[in-house]
Image (cartoon, grey):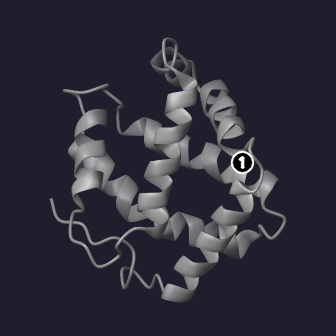
Amino acid sequence: MNVVMNAGIKGVSNESADRVWRSYQRCLEDFHFLQEFYLRFIEASPEVAQKFANTDMDHQVLMLRASLDLMLGGDRSASEPKALRQIAKLHSRSGVDVPARLYDCWLESLLLTVARFDPGFDDELEQAWRSELEQGIAYMKAAY
């Protein structure tokens, strides 16, 4: 699998990446951002709720933060970053078994949460978030 994170892919500009990064930073100003994302994500699907039934959510929040930092602010010139490869392996059939269909639910839950926490959120910014995350999500789905 070869993935180049964000820069230069499907018209994703550095300006778009920067705008999403700034949005993400605004969201992180509120301690509850990542916790609320998980509440929303878990409520979105019984399957998701089952996956998190016995999860240390404090640890999970830290892992989400690291994953988003990687996907949104990581080395955009790297081909198949090692950290993303490790995350994909962990979430694959042989790991915690996160089926590809749950990534769509993850993205929608994330965007609803960003919309709540970022006062600058609008349709254009939503599309930028989708564009920034699409390659990483496609990679995760393909690694399943």
Relative to 27, say whether 14 is above or below. below
Element type at marker 1?
helix
Q: Which residue shows up at 71% across the image and 45% down it? A: 33
Q: Nearer the viewer, residue 132 or 63?
A: 63
* Residue at the limit of the structure toward the top, as seen here: 54
Q: Can you give x and y, in whole percent of width and height, for residue 44 in the image? A: 63, 30
Relative to 94, say whether 130 is above or below. below
- On the image, numbered disc 1 is attached to which residue? 113
Image quadrant where residue 136 sits: bottom left
Image quadrant where residue 10 sits: bottom left
Q: Can you give x and y, in whole percent of width and height, for residue 81 in the image? A: 24, 62
Q: Residues within 10 Å of mark 1 (few under 14, many from 20)?
A: many
Q: Which residue shows up at 73% across the image and 70% down it? A: 123
127 relative to 77 in the view: left or right:
right
> Looking at the rendering, in which quadrant would you find the C terminus?
top left
Q: Can you give x and y, in whole percent of width and height, for residue 139 in the image? A: 29, 55
Q: Can you give x and y, in whole percent of width and height, for residue 112 in the image? A: 71, 49
Residue type for callout 1: Thr
Q: Which residue shows up at 36% across the image and 31% down it? A: 98
Relative to 131, say whether 95 is above or below. above
